Image (tube, rainbow, N blue to C red):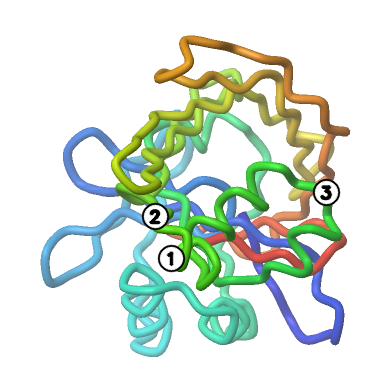
């Protein structure tokens, strides 16, 4: 998730979004729930009710993020400085999310985030030249304890695979989240391998009940 503001080397961000039936959550960055033509607040989860943002600019930016995440839109949303609450309970993220993110190939490689590298490759120009593409927007499921499953449909030429990344999120303090990747499963290869990657420390830079933005220290933004 991510909430970014300003500096030249911005911390990495992830966007999470919630959708109507089934509660779709966007991976780790901005999170929101949407219905055709308008935004609605997600219901309270053992917490006080969350109010819908009324700022027209915020609504416009969320619309932009849903239809093609850009770093500029994420930054603009963060700069509104309107988070209604601090992320204090990981169970607030429980549900299904879509993972979206602007292209940041270099920073993705610098961060050492294997999933981000794959994500960038499949949605970038090199991937298209090699007939590689994402079959659908990657989807993340988060349970009340913070366990995560990130699913992505990958295609290259006539071949296809459904990849699932298993991990977990833990609250490391108010607005601070630690992400751990545990294993990667390939449906076509019928193989699950350990995900060798250090835990990522993320900071919730924007959270209003509809949108969550998380950033790490490498300037990668996922929406």
Circle 2: is it few (<14), some (14-19), or many (20+) Cα within 10 Å? many
Left or right of 211, for residue 165:
right
User: How far apart in space, not on screen, are marks 3 and 2 (Cα)?
Assistant: 21 Å
- Secondary element under disc 3, as helix, strand or loop, is loop
Labels in figure, total? 3
Residue 151 visible, this orientation:
yes
**Nearer-the-camera pick, 56 or 143:** 143
Q: Which residue is mark 1?
A: 128
**Nearer-the-camera pick, 47 or 169:** 169
Q: Which residue is mark 2?
A: 133
Q: Where is residue 179 drawn, in percent x and y?
A: 74, 35
Label 2 vs 1, first from the N-terminus: 1
Q: Where is residue 134 drawn, in percent x and y?
A: 38, 51
- Secondary element under disc 2, as helix, strand or loop, is strand
**Nearer-the-camera pick, 213 or 200:** 200
With respect to residue 46, does 132 lie above or below? below
Residue at the spot 49% in from the left edge and 21% down from the top edge: 186
With respect to residue 197, does 62 lie above or below? below
Locate the N terminus and report the quarter of the image it occupies: bottom right
Q: Are marks 1 and 3 in contact (CB under 8 Å)?
A: no
Circle 3: is it few (<14), some (14-19), or many (20+) Cα within 10 Å? few
User: How far apart in space, not on screen, are marks 1 and 3 (Cα)?
Assistant: 22 Å
């Amino acid at each position: 998730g991510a909430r970014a503001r300003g500096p030249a080397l911005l911390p990495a961000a992830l966007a999470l979004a919630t959708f109507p039936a089934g509660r779709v959550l966007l991976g780790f960055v901005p999170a929101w729930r949407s219905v055709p033509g308008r935004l609605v607040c997600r219901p309270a989860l053992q917490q006080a009710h969350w109010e819908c943002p009324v700022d027209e600019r915020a609504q416009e930016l969320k619309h932009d993020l849903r239809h093609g995440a850009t770093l500029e839109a994420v930054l603009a949303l963060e700069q509104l400085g309107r988070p209604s609450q601090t992320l204090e309970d990981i169970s607030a993220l429980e549900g299904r999310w879509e993972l979206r993110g602007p292209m940041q190939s270099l920073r993705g490689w610098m961060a050492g985030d294997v999933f981000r590298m794959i994500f960038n490759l499949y949605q970038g120009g090199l991937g298209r030249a090699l007939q590689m593409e994402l079959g659908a927007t990657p989807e993340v499921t988060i349970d009340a304890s913070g366990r995560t499953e990130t699913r992505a449909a990958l295609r290259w030429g006539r071949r296809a695979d459904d990849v699932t990344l298993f991990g977990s999120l833990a609250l490391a303090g108010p607005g601070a989240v630690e992400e751990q990747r545990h294993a990667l499963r390939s449906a076509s290869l019928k193989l699950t391998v350990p995900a060798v990657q250090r835990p990522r420390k993320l900071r919730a830079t924007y959270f209003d009940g509809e949108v969550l933005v998380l950033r790490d220290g490498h300037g990668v933004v996922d929406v």
